[in-house]
Image (cartoon, grey):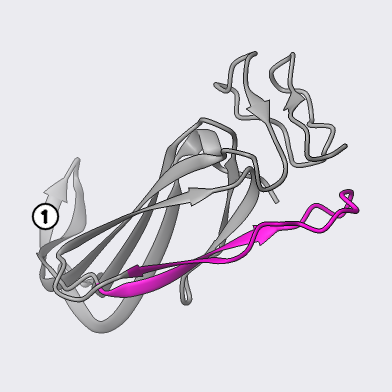
């Protein structure tokens, strides 16, 4: 039955359940389980928000590069971790969406969430969606980074574009899922 643990004997083989290959550093004793009794992993999600205050030009290896002075912002935001159902599994997926909320008045937000095994998609505003592979007992990190403002080259100097906004999601490399 699919809810029983599937032991993976060789690293790098695709999983029978169709999730994806295990991370290269998963080890031969990694176990995946599907269902409510699966222990999954504890994921540390952090958010850091910054604002660019000013830009200046700096000579680096014979080229003019833009550098910035930054300050921290309130890290209040909300992201979603959405389970991605494997089409080869006919059983209902017991996993459900997890909302991660960072309250106001935190400079650097940090939340811990427990996720069941499988592939999860990190959805955060206009940031590029990134997928993470959750493997039993393999805790990992997800970083959310937002920046208000951008420096752009302007002749021999640099100019601040205060209206620019960027968001980036980074999943610890060993848990980055393809697809």
Residue 109, image x, y percentages: 24, 61
Reading the image, the residue beneath label 1 is: 58
Q: Quadrant of residue 22?
A: top right
Front-most of residues 87 and 67: 87
Residue at 56% across, 42% down: 176
Residue at 80% across, 52% down: 86
Residue 65, image x, y percentages: 20, 56
The reply, left or right, for residue 66 in relation to residue 41 is left
Residue at 55% across, 21% down: 25
- What is the span of residues highlighted in magenta in the rendered image? 76-101
Front-most of residues 70 and 20: 20
Residue at 76% across, 57% down: 93
The reply, left or right, for residue 124 in relation to residue 130 is left
Label 1's element? strand
Q: Quadrant of residue 149?
A: bottom left
Q: Quadrant of residue 68?
A: bottom left
């Amino acid at each position: 039955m699919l809810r029983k643990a599937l032991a993976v004997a060789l690293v790098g083989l695709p999983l029978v359940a169709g999730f994806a290959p295990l991370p290269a550093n998963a080890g031969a004793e990694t176990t995946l389980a599907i269902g409510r009794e699966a222990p999954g992993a504890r994921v540390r999600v952090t958010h850091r928000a910054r604002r660019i205050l000013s830009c200046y030009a700096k000579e680096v290896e014979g080229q003019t590069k833009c550098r910035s002075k930054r300050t921290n912002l309130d890290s209040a935001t909300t992201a979603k971790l959405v389970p991605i159902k494997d089409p080869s599994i006919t059983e209902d997926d017991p996993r459900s969406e997890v909302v991660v909320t960072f309250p106001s008045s935190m400079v650097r937000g940090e939340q811990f969430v427990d996720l069941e095994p499988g592939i999860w998609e990190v959805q955060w505003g206009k940031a590029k969606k990134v997928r993470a592979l959750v493997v039993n007992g393999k805790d990992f990190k997800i970083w959310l980074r937002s920046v208000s403002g951008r420096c752009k080259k302007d002749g021999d100097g640099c100019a601040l574009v205060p209206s620019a906004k960027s968001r980036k999601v980074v999943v610890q490399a060993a848990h980055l899922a393809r697809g």
